[in-house]
Image (cartoon, rainbow, N blue to C red):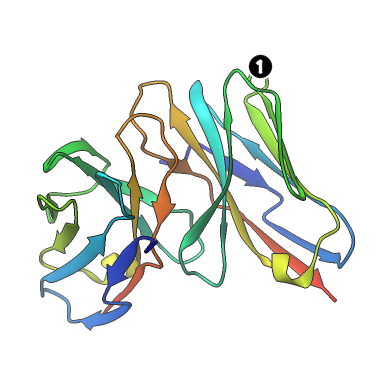
Amino acid sequence: DAGVTQSPTHLIKTRGQQVTLRCSPKSGHDTVSWYQQALGQGPQFIFQYYEEEERQRGNFPDRFSGHQFPNYSSELNVNALLLGDSALYLCASSLGWVNTEAFFGQGTRLTVV
Amino acid sequence: SQQGEEDPQALSIQEGENATMNCSYKTSINNLQWYRQNSGRGLVHLILIRSNEREKHSGRLRVTLDTSKKSSSLLITASRAADTASYFCATVLISGYSTLTFGKGTMLLVSP
């Protein structure tokens, strides 16, 4: 049973560019959440998708956007990259969007130079 | 913002010893979860304790929850070098949404 898979594992982008990160949820899961983890910090919630709609959003600017596809996979897009966007981006999947256990992928390490 | 705060920030022990990490939070919760992270990679779910539970066990892990003090503790018994990792507590608020609010974590080093 494949767990949560994220791609790519590492990415280097230049300030001002745009980036797309991808996530495939654990088999049977229909909800995907994205988190940003800066070095030495705990993960911060970005947003959550369920039934192809954004259900919850954390305190992140509109430069961060996402999408969920009919097969439940998801993308995180970040526009106009800033140096401060350098972080580990984690995708988590769960069954349903109410108080359930989340399973995390290995993350995408984004470095903005 | 980060709701949970782990204590201590770092903990260094010898193999075979017990490790205790504490977590405090600010607002009422539906449940609290503990996660483990190796070397800045993905998070591994360890245990979930609901607000109406006081203690849960899973293998060498014991978690307690005191909702009156808004605190939780994670005890790892008979620690092994392989337990070296960062440990995070994460709360799910009573709103019903399964979004997690993490603390900054405790870095545990277990020496052989």
Asked which secondary structure carries label 1, the reply is loop
Which quadrant would the N terminus of chain A be assigned to in this image? bottom left
Q: How many marks?
A: 1
Residue with the most extreme front position = A1
In the image, residue A41 sits, relative to residue B95, either above or below, namely below
Work out whether residue A49 or residue B23 is closer to the camera in this orientation and state it.
A49
In the image, residue A9 sits, relative to residue A57, either above or below, namely below
Q: Amino acid at mark 1?
A: Ser
The residue wearing badge 1 is B68
Residue A95, horizontal then vertical, whole percent: 33, 40
Quadrant location of residue B33?
A: top right
Quadrant location of residue B50?
A: top right
Q: At x 10% / y 75%, what residue is drawn?
A: A17
- Label 1 neighbourhood size at 10 Å, few (<14), some (14-19), many (20+)? few
Work out whether residue B73 or residue A72 is closer to the camera in this orientation and state it.
A72
Q: At x 85% / y 76%, what residue is drawn?
A: B112
Quadrant location of residue A56?
A: top left
Q: Chain of mark 1?
A: B
Q: Is residue A13 left or right of residue A40?
A: left
In the image, residue B42 sits, relative to residue B106, either above or below, namely below
Q: At x 14% / y 53%, what residue is drawn?
A: A71
